[in-house]
Amino acid sequence: MRRPEARVIAGVCDGVAQHLGVPAVAVRVVFIALTGFGGAGILAYAGLWAFVPLQRSEPSDRPAVPRRDRGQSVALIALALGVILALAQFNVAGGTDVVVPLLIAGVGVALIWRRMDERPASTGNRGWLLLTAGAALVIAGLIAFLVQADQLGAARQALVAIVVIVVGLVLVTAPWWWRLATELTAERRERIRTQERAEVAAHLHDSVLQTLALIQRHVDSPREVARLARGQERELRSWLYGRGPDPAVRFAAAIQAAAAEVEDSYAVAVETVVVGDCDLDNAAGAVVQAAREALINAARHAGVEEVSLYAEVESKRIAVYVRDRGVGFDPAAVPEDRQGLRGSIEGRMQRHGGKANVRSAAGAGTEVELTMDRDAA
């Protein structure tokens, strides 16, 4: 494999060195030495460049154009000049009159191949500049070669004849090419539709149909049926409309994931409304954990089938409200050693600079208010 980050021209020498387990410098010396034997080194390098695949790496956040590209360009120019001097010294193939135009065209081909090796998204305008420059060098080299060989006039006449023949062939075969392109387009669309239908069928079989089978088994338990249906609804919405933000990174996704976890674990419906969003730092994470504990307490002790959660992210604070219409309790009568309220909710919020306010009364339900300043440590 040719590694893009280790190449001087195309990465051939580095790939051969990695394959043989020898230093890359030694391989480069061998290629340079073989160049003196009728250009065998150049031919071998070009052949390996054509047939050895490029190692594709994942996109990264690093700059698209590394600084060492300048060094690679200098190395390419130095190699071309060295070959010109060597061939001129030994008067190979007629000296520099023929060699220089061909080397110019060779440099253009190298630039074009290098453009093909790079990712289109990572090169941008620079990639098109390389492609244009390479094509210009190839054309200039070929024209210079024809001028040196005094064959420019003959080449012009041959080019006109070739253009006339090509145009005639295109006109004659145009209906066939048009039908072929239409059939290929239709086949491609049908293949895409078939793949999409197969993916939808596989997903429905793996998720929706399995959930429907479970609902049939628990038809006598309305809470279990509601839990299965709501869980399948969340999963199906996520599949249809794409995955949301990562719960480990964003506050809204994290608190929605906590509500979904409580729904699945305790078979209660959690009506969740989240307004605004922010990064999930330590303070926001503490709010999520405290809200999760409040939801668990409501699901376990309130005796209700539905709990509401409202979260709002403002510019300077985060506010979360967890409400139920259950049996309620007296917050003052809760023992100090009960970690569910004292430690996991009130204590956690205080440790991170926030506040927890619990309002409840027997038979009147419970409301837990959690507030946290955005700049809290």
Image (cartoon, helix red, strand yellow):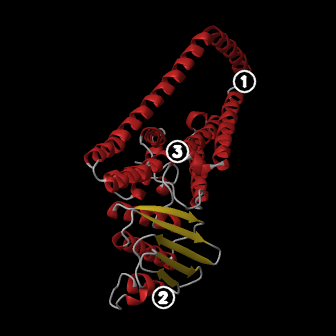
Up the image or down, 248 lies above or below 47; here it is below
Q: For the view shown, which residue lies furthest in the front direction? A: 363
Percent across and percent down for residue 21 are 32, 56
Residue at x-position 52% and y-position 58%: 60
Left-right relation of 113 to 171: left
Q: CA distance from mark 2 to mark 1?
A: 87 Å
Question: Along the line of sight, which residue is nearer the eye, 359 or 42?
Answer: 359
Residue at x-position 37% and y-position 41%: 203
Q: Is residue 36 visible?
A: no
Up the image or down, 258 lies above or below 42; here it is below
Percent across and percent down for residue 246 are 47, 62
Q: CA distance from mark 3 to mark 1?
A: 33 Å
Q: For the view shown, which residue lies furthest in the bottom direction? A: 336
Instruction: Please rate how many residues cluster around mark 2, counting C-alpha atoms within 10 Å: few if below 14, some from 14 to 19, many from 20.
Output: some
Question: Along the line of sight, which residue is nearer the eye, 241 or 259?
Answer: 259
Percent across and percent down for residue 142 are 66, 31
Instruction: Please rate how many residues cluster around mark 3, counting C-alpha atoms within 10 Å: few if below 14, some from 14 to 19, many from 20.
Output: some
Q: For the view shown, which residue lies furthest in the top direction? A: 172
User: Residue under circle 1?
Assistant: 152
Q: CA distance from mark 2 to mark 3?
A: 57 Å
| Label 3 SS | helix
Q: Considering only order in the chain, which callout, 1 or 3, is on the residue closer to the N terminus?
A: 3
Circle on res. 350 = 2
